[in-house]
Image (cartoon, rainbow, N blue to C red):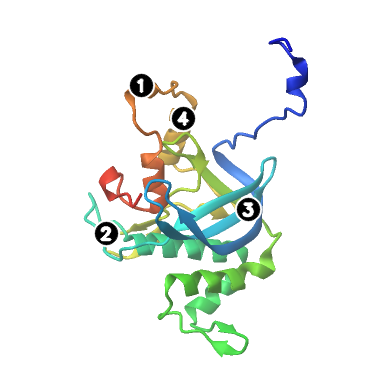
Amino acid sequence: MGMFDLTATTGVKESGKYLQPGIHNAKFVGIELNDLVSQKNSQNYKTMKLTLDIDGFGEFNHNFFEPTSDKRTPGTWAENPSPVEQFMVAVRQIVDALDSKIGAAIDADNIEINGKHINLKDLNFDQLVKLIAILTKPYAGKELEVKLIPQSNGFADIPGFPAKCDRNGKLAIQTKFIGANLIINQSEQRKIDAAKNAQPTNMSQTTSGSVEGLAEQLGIEDTSSDLPF
């Protein structure tokens, strides 16, 4: 057999589509409790996996890692929300995007499953994710928009820090990443522009191109020493 055997190309297909940053039309598929295993230390990490069907791309998954701290940190103008608060704001954005009635029931502490009242103030991570999965299951197929921003690992993903605190310490939305009539703020537009103009990475000068992206997904400060992996 010669070196140039064209039959070796039989069945070759495009490996995958590149998901561009920006605002995309999508359909909600579902939420589930998920486990990820670290390739570095084989440790398991729990996540809430959000699955969407993005127009022109297909199935897209985003894992919201189980937060490990409810402590706020000092910021330049105000406190930074805790990882737990970042996660909870993300959850609230998702349910509000699917049906405002879910959020209204949460506000009224009036969530019932099979006729049983659910104490929303006493849920662990597993219970919360399973509850959100149940509440959102009827909305599979609902059309909505999702915002994806360039990460330092080169991929577009859901913004890692959806929450902020105002000067009075009240929790607020920093960026709306799912729902209707989404917009790109100035900071996000700068990231998109920078990604378009980025030069190829010199791999001989870097040990990892994904640390910052992991930090954003984990909802922690952008330092490798904080990473659980």
Within 10 Å of the Cα at label 2, are there few (<14), some (14-19), or many (20+) other Cα atoms? few
- The residue beneath circle 1 is 204
User: What residue is drawn where x is 69% and y is 30%?
Assistant: 14
Q: Which residue is mark 3?
A: 52
Q: Residue 223: in sight, yes or no? A: no
Up/down of 72 relative to 203, above or below: below
Amino acid type assigned to the residue bearing label 1 in the image? Ser
Is 122 on the left-hand or right-hand side of 15? left
Q: Is residue 107 left or right of residue 54?
A: left
Q: Nearer the viewer, mark 2 or mark 3?
A: 3
Q: Earlier in the sequence, mark 4 or mark 3?
A: 3
> According to the image, label 2 marks what residue?
167
Tell me the CA gap for discs 2 and 3. Answer: 35 Å
Measuring 53% from the left and 52% from the top, which residue is drawn there? 62
Real-space Cα distance between discs 2 and 4? 31 Å
Residue 181 on image: x %, y %: 59, 51
Is residue 204 or residue 1 the one in the foreground?
1
Q: Are marks 1 and 4 in contact (CB under 8 Å)?
A: no
Amino acid type indicated by mark 3: Leu
